[in-house]
Image (spheres, rainbow, N blue to C red):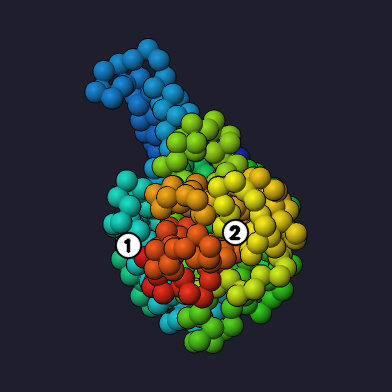
Amino acid sequence: MGIKSLLGSLFGHSDNQMPSSLGKGKEVSPRYNLGDKSTLSVDENSLQLQMKEKKNKKKNFQKRGKHGKKNKKNIHAKKMESSPISETHNLIILDESGSMSCVRSQTISGCNETLNSIRNTAKEQPDMKQFVSIFCFDTTNSRYVFQDVPVEDTRDLTEKDYSPNSCTPLYDAIGYTVTLLRRLIENTNSAAVVTIITDGYENASRRWHHQSVVELIDCLKKKGWVFTFIGANIDVEQTAQGLGINSYSRFEQTDEGMSAMFEEERLSRLAYYSKVNYMRNLLDFDSMPMAEREEQLGAMNENYFVAKERIAPEFIESLGEKDIFVFGSNIHGIHSGGAAKFALDHFGAIMKQAEGIQGQSYAIPTDGNTFNELKEAVGRLTDYVVMHPQNNFMLTAVGCGTAGYSVEQIAPLFRQAYTFGNVYVPAGFLPFMPKNPNV
């Protein structure tokens, strides 16, 4: 097999460049020149060996059951259709062009904070394996620092790992790394989150063009992948939306700006992990067909970035298009006073509907319920929140009025929902929320 056809069969993009030595689960530093078409260095025998090894592993796994005995049925395919996700693959595509040199040290420290957050999550959620890829790109020295490495095997980055230089082949970097990760986790129960950080416009790609990257991102969003875009010195909104990326953030190229950006990214990533971990343990999610699960994970492309403290207005008089007004109801759904009456008059609440979504509001039955029944109702709201990550939930002081409960009793019930990043609580509830959300 010729090298060009081999690459085409591997990645579905015959003009893809590829480093000479990449291995899943290993720290790698191959050189990958994105700016010169002539510098394609690939060991064809090595690639054929990798393909053969992967094929044999897959065949053996499909033939063998839980105890290593051969089965006639395709156990792997059956497991894939019924098991919840058990891995998250984190890909960070990091601009290393010359203009990033002014924030070199801040970029390194910010990436290390992100790595620490992922490590902490792996410790707290041991049944959800975390893998990390960091790809630094410019036109002369693009490479993986880590390529799909278990996070516990990573180390902190140093100045040797990140030395800004040259131009910005953004499309090539996205196309190459995303396609490779797609092949690595194909046909597995995995979640994937891709973070793109750049301070400049695309100006040097040779193999991937705008439309091919857009099509790739769109295809994988439908498979449940989440893409985020973080930029400086460019029209971030236009660039991100032009690529089909819904969640984007801007940063200033200063010490303070980089620190704030990485803190926002860290909190948003941890909120994403919190949602994925909670979602995968829901019976409704576990029983979904694979296509519906992918659609549900893909919904997290909306509303990814979260603020550190999320406080609802004291008086909620209007809502954004995606906001939901959360209020306390009585067990009969008679919305005759307070927040319930306001929801009835303004946000689509339905008379005699005591619980659940109604219009642009969500009712929690408090008055007439026991505390345990109220707690269960808050649990159902939590389930609803995690399955609707595109919405923001604006919480009133549920249960602290005519129902007679105190803030000290009620507020802690919403701690889990608050970690998802799309719940805003009354100011009085904030002291009872996690001090460092999602950690």
Q: Quadrant of the C terminus?
A: bottom left
Compare residues 364 and 160 and report the one nearer the observer: 364
Residue 411: x percent and y percent?
A: 44, 65
Q: Residue at x 34, y 24 (%)?
A: 60
Query: Does the rendering let one see residue 197?
Result: no
Does the residue at mark 2 contact the one at mark 1 (Cβ under 8 Å)? no
Q: Quadrant of residue 432?
A: bottom left
Instruction: Please name the residue that numbered disc 2 is placed on.
Output: 326
User: Quick one: SS at disc 2?
Assistant: strand
Position above or below: 107 against 438 = below
Residue 289 as seen in the image, left or right of residue 28: right
Position above or below: 256 against 340 = below
Quick one: label 2 or label 1, which is nearer the N terminus?
1
Residue type, numbered disc 1: Asn
Compare residues 151 and 437 and report the one nearer the observer: 437
Residue 326: x percent and y percent?
A: 60, 59
Residue type, numbered disc 2: Val
Residue 114: x percent and y percent?
A: 41, 68
Position above or below: 332 against 57 = below
Query: Does the rendering let one see residue 77?
Result: yes
Position above or below: 145 against 16 = below
Instruction: Please name the residue that numbered disc 1 is placed on.
Output: 120
Label 2 environment density (alpha carbons within 10 Å; few <14, some 14–19, many ≥20): many
Q: Residue at x 47, y 63 (%)?
A: 404
